[in-house]
């Protein structure tokens, strides 16, 4: 095994920090339009249809945008936002799923 210089990261020049543009109301609305209303709910039991109904309220949409912007500003995305359940529905006459093309 090759010995690694632990100070190699010190040799990489620092780049200036880039700022993040806040999400806009229109960006959220446009993104939500692309979400399928008939998809299964997540672990929180909310469907896209529920969330679309919630964001019709001005206060709610801006609270949701605030949460996203604060998470990005802090550099922290809570783990429960990253959790999902995937269920594989087999295709007829497919007996192996070794390749992504088979799904």
Image (cartoon, rainbow, N blue to C red):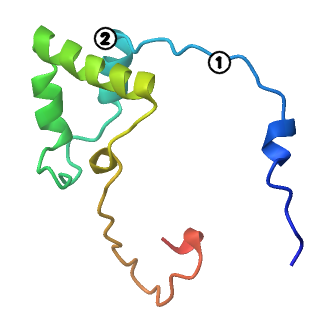
Res. 27 image quadrant: top left
Residue that appears at 14% across and 50% down: 44
Residue that appears at 36% across and 28% down: 71
Residue at the spot of label 2:
25
Across and down, in percent, residue 24 comes to 37, 10
Q: Secondary structure at mark 2?
A: helix
Estimate the spatial distance between the alpha carbons at disc 2 and disc 1, rounded to whole Å.
25 Å
Answer above or below: position of 34 versus 19: below
Residue that appears at 17% across and 51% down: 41
Q: Secondary structure at mark 1?
A: loop
Asked whether, in this view, residue 15 is left or right of residue 62, the answer is right
Answer above or below: position of 19 versus 90: above
Asked whether, in this view, residue 64 is left or right of residue 23, the answer is left
Answer above or below: position of 79 versus 74: below
Across and down, in percent, residue 36 comes to 28, 41
Across and down, in percent, residue 60 comes to 13, 17
Crowdedness near tag 1: few (<14), some (14–19) or many (≥20) residues, C-alpha within 10 Å: few
Residue 67 visible here = yes
Residue 56 visible here = no
Answer above or below: position of 23 versus 74: above
| Quadrant (top left, top right, bottom left, bottom right) of the N terminus | bottom right
Residue at the spot of label 1:
17
Asked whether, in this view, residue 98 is left or right of residue 70, the answer is right
Residue that appears at 57% across and 13% down: 19
């Amino acid at each position: 095994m090759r010995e690694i210089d632990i100070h190699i990261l010190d040799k990489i020049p620092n780049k200036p920090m880039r700022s993040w543009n806040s999400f806009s109301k229109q960006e959220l609305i446009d993104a939500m339009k692309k979400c399928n209303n008939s998809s299964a709910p997540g672990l929180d039991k909310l469907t896209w249809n529920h969330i679309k109904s919630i964001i019709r309220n001005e206060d709610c949409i801006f609270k949701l945008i605030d949460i996203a912007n604060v998470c990005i500003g802090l550099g922290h995305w809570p783990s429960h936002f990253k959790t999902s359940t995937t269920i594989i529905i087999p295709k007829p006459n497919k007996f192996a799923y070794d390749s992504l093309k088979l799904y």
